[in-house]
Amino acid sequence: MRRIVVIIALTLFLKPVFPVIEYIVNYDYIAKVLCVNKDKPMMHCNGKCHLMKQLAKEAENEKPIVPNKKGSVQETEMVFCLYGPTFELPKIYFNSIPKINTYYADFYDYAATLSVFHPPAV
């Protein structure tokens, strides 16, 4: 079931990229047969004109239909799942008191000297 949902989600997300994939796969056929500018090789179009037409058509299909401004009614679709995934959070107990280290020893010593070290004169 998850695989089907993942495949459908990937298809929806990658739908705008399908013309580009088709262009890459069928590059030679599009450049030689479907290219509008195949009579003008100095333009180096190589079928990009066909790709742009396909991308424009795909973008046109993606646009939502705009309802009339007068009396427009907005419809919203809602999906309810009766049985969904369940999970339980692990129980965390905070009753334990951290052990305090009573064997702390301060072995740090600081010896302050007031004289300044001078190297020997030669």
Image: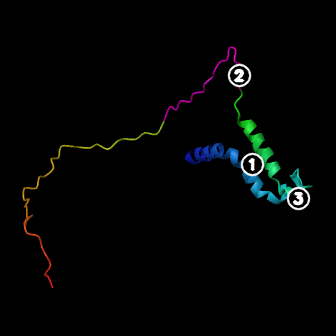
SS for callout 2: loop
Neighbours of disc 3 within 10 Å: few (<14), some (14-19), many (20+): few
What amino acid type should be assigned to the residue bearing mark 1?
Pro
What residue is disc 2 on?
67
Q: Which residue is mark 3?
A: 41
The residue most toward the right is 39
Amino acid under disc 2: Pro
Asked where in the image residue 9 lies, by quadrant, the reply is top right
Q: Earlier in the sequence, mark 1 or mark 2?
A: 1
The reply, left or right, for residue 112 in relation to residue 88 is left
Which residue is painted at 13% across and 75% down in the image?
118
Q: Label 3 is placed on what type of residue?
A: Pro
Instruction: Read off the magenta span.
Output: 66-83
Q: Which residue lies under the disc numbered 1? A: 19
Image quarter in which the C terminus is found: bottom left
Q: CA distance from mark 1 to mark 3?
A: 23 Å
